[in-house]
Amino acid sequence: MRILSVNVGDSRPVTVKNRTIQTGIYKIPAKGPIAVSRLGLQDDVRIEVRKMGLEHSAVYAYPHEHYAYWQQQLECDPFPIGQFGENLTVTGLLEEEVRIGDIFRFGNTVLQVAHPRIPCGKLNARMGLRFAPMFLASRKVGFYMRVLTEGTVAQDDTIELLERDEASPTMEEFVRITHYEYWDTEGLKSLLQARDLMPDWREVIEAKLVRSQATTGWHGIREFEVSAAEQESNNTISLYLKCVRGRELAPFHGGQQLMVVLGERGGGSQQRKSYYLSSNPHDLSSYRINVAQNSTGNKTGTDSSVSTELQQLQVGDRIMCNAPHGAVRSILENMLEDRIAVLISEGQGIAPMLSLLYELEKLQIRARLFHESVADEPQQLLVEVSALIERNQDFNNIHVELDKQDHISARLIRDHVVLAQSDIYVAGSQDFIERLMNEFMAIDFSPAAMITYRID
């Protein structure tokens, strides 16, 4: 571990959100030893830090190992030293290792790690693009230090670790939990145990903890690991997803979706697509989604490329997802005893119907399933549906195979259930849904109250 460069800067005007402000982010390498006082490096212009205080942000260090990473990500020429506004360009001090409260000797100066850098608009101005979100999302942010013993620092000075609390969070953990995993109650609690956590940060984290404890689900995007991948058909795969932190997942209702987010956090090229959950809403150890490359009515472009990438995932791979979302029948738990849930599905539409059947089973609500088979549909899900129906005397399955009779129709459904006493759910392609809605209207039954799940 050593200091590759000591950098200082002057005050310059920059435009941030249509306002001209002064900044000291433009740093250049200094020659010879530089004195370090309680509030920073000699001859380095400091602009007032509004929240954390200058004494807690006296010296900013950034790992030189990240320069090559950003050059590759941004596809640009090599950066000059000091590009990220750091006082010390260092080697061997990565965010996955450096912890809150670490005490290091830099030359003959003793510094203590106070907190990671949370970028602002000044970094965007310095980089000439909307860089701050990418920078934060990478967690390659460097760290600020307070001065315990004043001294000097110079290029090629060695860096020595003097003291470390192994229970304190690393810079990577701190940024990840405070800015991306603030749904994680246990993670927030662990941050609050840090021995040298600053009072200002403690206040922020305590507020996040209160919010995380008061809500179900989570905010923002969460990281998942593929725990299993099962081939359902030639073009369909089931992915089982578990929280990489080992936390219980957020509750969901039958018929809700999980949005998959591909691409770097903070980047401008993220791709998103929602998939219906087919797992049991009462088992929150993992989520299951079903990815069909050539679903009926599947779109081209982004949706198709997301499905292609997901189908290539293997056990142990990681993806990002938003919380479950989508329409649910708000009166499901308050259904009257004489009403019945009528589930109508086509092909891949069996996925949301399966999770809905699990929910109906728990609530002991009567159900009738009308399923229209098509080529290349999820076979294991159909086996699971059959087992679920067989063990529930209040469930019944009316299965339609296209090589034996016509499509499912509104008249067929009317022959099996009393429509006026039915709550109807329909899942399938857009053509399938539109055809059924038109047929229901033709027999004087309004489809306005139906819940539909379109499978793209």
Image (cartoon, helix red, strand yellow):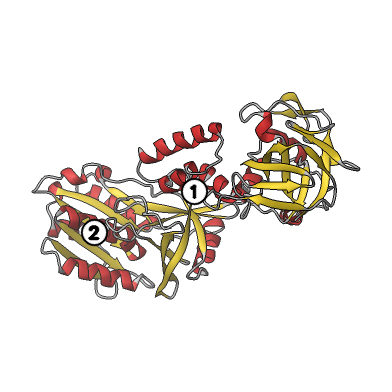
Q: Is residue 212 visible?
A: yes
On the image, which quarter does residue 280 sit in? bottom left
Residue shown at the point (62%, 55%) measured from the top left: 97
Residue sitting nearer the eye, 7 or 361: 7
The residue that label 1 is drawn on is 221
Query: Can you say which quadrant of the picture contains the N terminus?
Result: bottom right
- Pair 2/1: label in front: 1
Up-down relation of residue 70 to residue 215 (above or below): below
Residue sitting nearer the eye, 237 or 74: 74
The residue that label 2 is drawn on is 358
Find residue 141 and report its horizontal and vertical position in percent.
Answer: 66, 46
On the image, which quarter does residue 357 sit in? bottom left
Find residue 415 and report its horizontal and vertical position in percent.
Answer: 13, 59
Residue sitting nearer the eye, 397 or 51: 51
Is residue 104 found left or right of 273 in the rendered image? right
Find residue 291 and report its horizontal and vertical position in percent.
Answer: 44, 64
Q: Secondary structure at mark 2?
A: helix
Up-down relation of residue 21 to residue 153 (above or below): above
Find residue 445 and report its horizontal and vertical position in percent.
Answer: 20, 46
How many numbered dots are placed on residues in this image?
2
Amino acid type, callout 1: Ile
On the image, which quarter does residue 342 sit in? bottom left
Q: CA distance from mark 2 to mark 1?
A: 26 Å
Q: Are marks 2 and 1 in contact (CB under 8 Å)?
A: no
Amino acid type, callout 2: Tyr
Q: Secondary structure at mark 1?
A: loop
Is residue 309 found left or right of 152 in the rendered image? left
Residue sitting nearer the eye, 222 or 312: 222
